[in-house]
Structure formats: structure tokens, C-alpha cells
Amino acid sequence: MAICPVCNGFEKLEATCSSCGKNMEDSGRIMDFYDDYSAYMPIDQMKLEDGYPQDYQKEECPHLLKCPSCGYDEVKFIKE
Ligand SMILES: [Zn+2]
Ligand SMILES: [Zn+2]
């Protein structure tokens, strides 16, 4: 099983807000937000649902980044 360095604390995710330029905060894996209702969904359907067509089989870990100062958020794919 592939390991995401950010999830495991080896690396800190750093990004700047494209809206205000401040440092963004890692809110964690985006998959964690879908756990409640996605457990019974086929993975293909999930890809459509969340709007990110990237293939999770490519071992990229999608993280949700949030800007604490303006509230802007974006998803960053971490190579595992
Ligand atoms: Zn991760
Ligand atoms: Zn911002």
C-alpha cells in the first residue's frame, strides 16, 4: 500500500492561497470527508460525485487546503 508523506507526517504541505497569497492550511485527505456516505459507492461513481476526475489508482492523495484568512479552499494531489 502506498504511503502519502503528508498523511504520515513526513512532509508538511505548503501552499499559498491563490486568492490572497497567505499560507494555506492542510485540512486533511479529501477522502475523509466522504467516508460517511461513500463507503458503499463504487469508486467510479465517487470520482464523478466530487468533481475530480483524476484516477485514484495513480496513487495520488487528494488533500483539502483551506486559507484561514479568506476562506478560499482548493484540492492538491500529493504523489505517494
Ligand atoms: Zn495524504
Ligand atoms: Zn486566502
Image: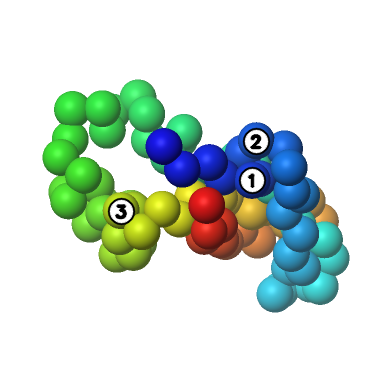
Residue named by callout 1: 5
Residue at 76%, 59% (x, y): give it. 14
**Which type of secondary structure does the marked residue at label 1 adopt?**
loop
Residue 51 visible in the picture: no
Judge the density around disc 1: few (<14), some (14-19), many (≥20) Cα neighbours within 10 Å: some
Asked whether mark 1 and ligand 1 are closer than 8 Å, the reply comes as yes
Asked whether mark 2 and ligand 1 are closer than 8 Å, the reply comes as yes
Q: Disc 2 residue type?
A: Asn
Residue named by callout 2: 8
Residue at 17%, 35% (x, y): give it. 41
* Rendered image: mark on residue 29: none
**Which type of secondary structure does the marked residue at label 2 adopt?**
loop
Label 3 – label 1 distance at C-alpha: 17 Å
Asked whether mark 3 and ligand 1 are closer than 8 Å, the reply comes as no
Residues tagged 2 and 3 counted as in contact (Cβ below 8 A): no
Lower position in the chain sequence, tag 3 or tag 1: 1
Left or right side of 29 for 67: right
**Which type of secondary structure does the marked residue at label 3 adopt?**
helix
